[in-house]
Structures are given as structure tokens and as C-alpha cells.
Amino acid sequence: MTREERQLREAIIAKCRWMNASGLNQGTSGNISARYKDRMLITPSATPYDAMEPEMIASMPLEGAYGEWDGPLQPSTEWRFHLDIMRARPDVGGIVHTHSTYATVLAIARKPIPACHYMMAAFGGTDIRCAGYARYGTKELSELAIAALEGRNGCLLANHGMIALGANLDKAMWLAVELETIARQYYLSLALGSACILSDEEIAETARGFSTYGLQTSQPKPAMKARTSAKAALRRAEKKRSRKR
């Protein structure tokens, strides 16, 4: 095991422990995977996170024999949708699956989440779909999840929970938190009687803003340019006065 792989395995365990401590998940019901070169690293089945060690993380090939795995423990029972998503989506480097409370409540009611908040743009569209129901761990559930994730970075699973995808593990966990937050906000707005939904254009406008969010310019600010120009002018004037003397 390389140092890089060990660090990724440790990060998976740390994320598992954090999501339980934060209330985003309960017990061993959730699972996390991450892409590592041509393999997928995934949490083992029915193993308490506090007892998990890097060597216990299962490793599965992204290509080749479907369902093969290496490690002392079997991979999560949900390995199929993790593996199938990573095979279908080269842009995905991390997957977080939880049974978070509000996302699961909406999944039980089989309610997709509309654009009730501008952060919906972070998921790639104007809604969070709810995949149809199939028993956990089945190929059918995997196919339903992939359909619900078409063009999206998150979905609900009917009577089950939610899935969040990211380019890496940090982004996947960030979106899992955002999905649960939006689910809670939508649920509470419905409790008030209604929710005002943003238009497609309003979400598209937010998405365009996200495309440059956090970018820094290397060009000097206009005010700094003005101060620099003023100082240069003073120096030139001082030189002229010196020559006249």
C-alpha cells in the first residue's frame, strides 16, 4: 500500500466518523467510497467506524471482473451502486451515502426536492430527483440510482436515504451536507404551508456565478494602480524641480 493510498483510506474513515458525530448518519447504515487510480476504495460491510482501520477498507477494480474485491472484510452491501456510478461517471472521485434524517423523510414520502434554494445549482440542475424503490444492495437499486443521478450530483433513494457525488471525497461530503440542509429547509417550508420555487433561469444564473466563485485575479486593483501612478507623478515633478535649482 502506497502512502497516498493509505492517506485516502484514512480520509474515508475520518469522513465516516465525522458524518456520524455530526448527525448526518447513524450507526453503520452509511457508506463511503473514493476513486484511487484504477480501483475503488470502499468501506467494509457492518463494521463500526470507530473500530475501522485503513487495512479494513475494501479495494475493488473499476474495470475487469465485476464484484471482485481485495481486503480482509467484504465491501459494503451497497458496493454495486458505488461501483456502477464510478464506472458510468469518470468525473466522480468520491461518493457518500447516508440515511440522514430529512433527506430520508422526503425519500419515504417519495418527494423530489425542487429549486427551493439557490444552492440547488451545486447539484447540476433544478431539482434533486427521488429514485424508485428497490431493496438495498441490488442491481436494480443501482440502475434506479444512476437514472436519478443523470446530470446531477445527488439524489434521494425511495424509502432509503440519499447519495451525494463529488470530484473528490471532500466535495462529495460537502454536497452530502448541502443535500441534507436543503432537504431540511424544504421540509420546514412545507410545514409552513408552501415553498416559493426559483425559476430555471434563476438557478442557471447561480450556476454561472458558481463557475467563477472563489477565483482570484492577478491584476492590480484600480485603486492600487491609481496610487502607483500618483507616486510616479510626484517623483517626476520632484526631479524637474531639482533640475531647475
Image: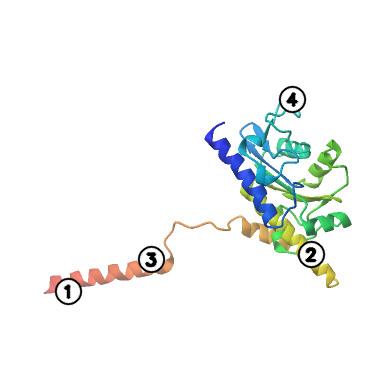
Mark 2 → mark 1, Cα distance in angstroms: 71 Å
Q: Is any atom of residue 198 visible in this view?
A: no
Task: Assign a secondary structure to mark 3.
Answer: helix
Say whether disc 3 or disc 4 marks the residue closer to the N-terminus. Answer: 4
Mark 3 → mark 2, Cα distance in angstroms: 47 Å
Q: Which residue is mark 3?
A: 225
Query: What's the residue type where badge 3 is placed?
Result: Lys
> What residue appears at the point 58 percent right and 36 percent down from the top-left corner?
5
In the rendering, at what x and y percent does residue 230 appear? 32, 71
The reply to whether discs 3 and 4 touch (Cβ–Cβ < 8 Å) is no
In the rendering, at what x and y percent does residue 142 appear? 81, 40
Query: What's the residue type where badge 4 is placed?
Result: Ala
Say whether disc 2 or disc 4 marks the residue closer to the N-terminus. Answer: 4
Say whether disc 4 or disc 1 marks the residue closer to the N-terminus. Answer: 4
Between 187 and 70, the one lying in front of the other is: 70
Between 40 and 74, the one lying in front of the other is: 74
Q: Quadrant of the N terminus?
A: top right
Between 118 and 46, the one lying in front of the other is: 46
Mark whose residue sits in front, 3 or 2: 2
Quadrant in which residue 41 is drawn: top right
Query: What's the residue type where badge 2 is placed?
Result: Tyr
Q: Which residue is mark 4?
A: 65
Mark sitting on residue 241: 1
- Relative height, residue 181 to residue 42 (above, below): below
Mark 2 → mark 4, Cα distance in angstroms: 42 Å
In the rendering, at what x and y percent does residue 171 appear? 63, 50
Task: Assign a secondary structure to mark 2.
Answer: helix
Q: Which residue is mark 2?
A: 186
Left/right of residue 136 with respect to residue 152 in the rendered view: right
Mark whose residue sits in front, 3 or 4: 4
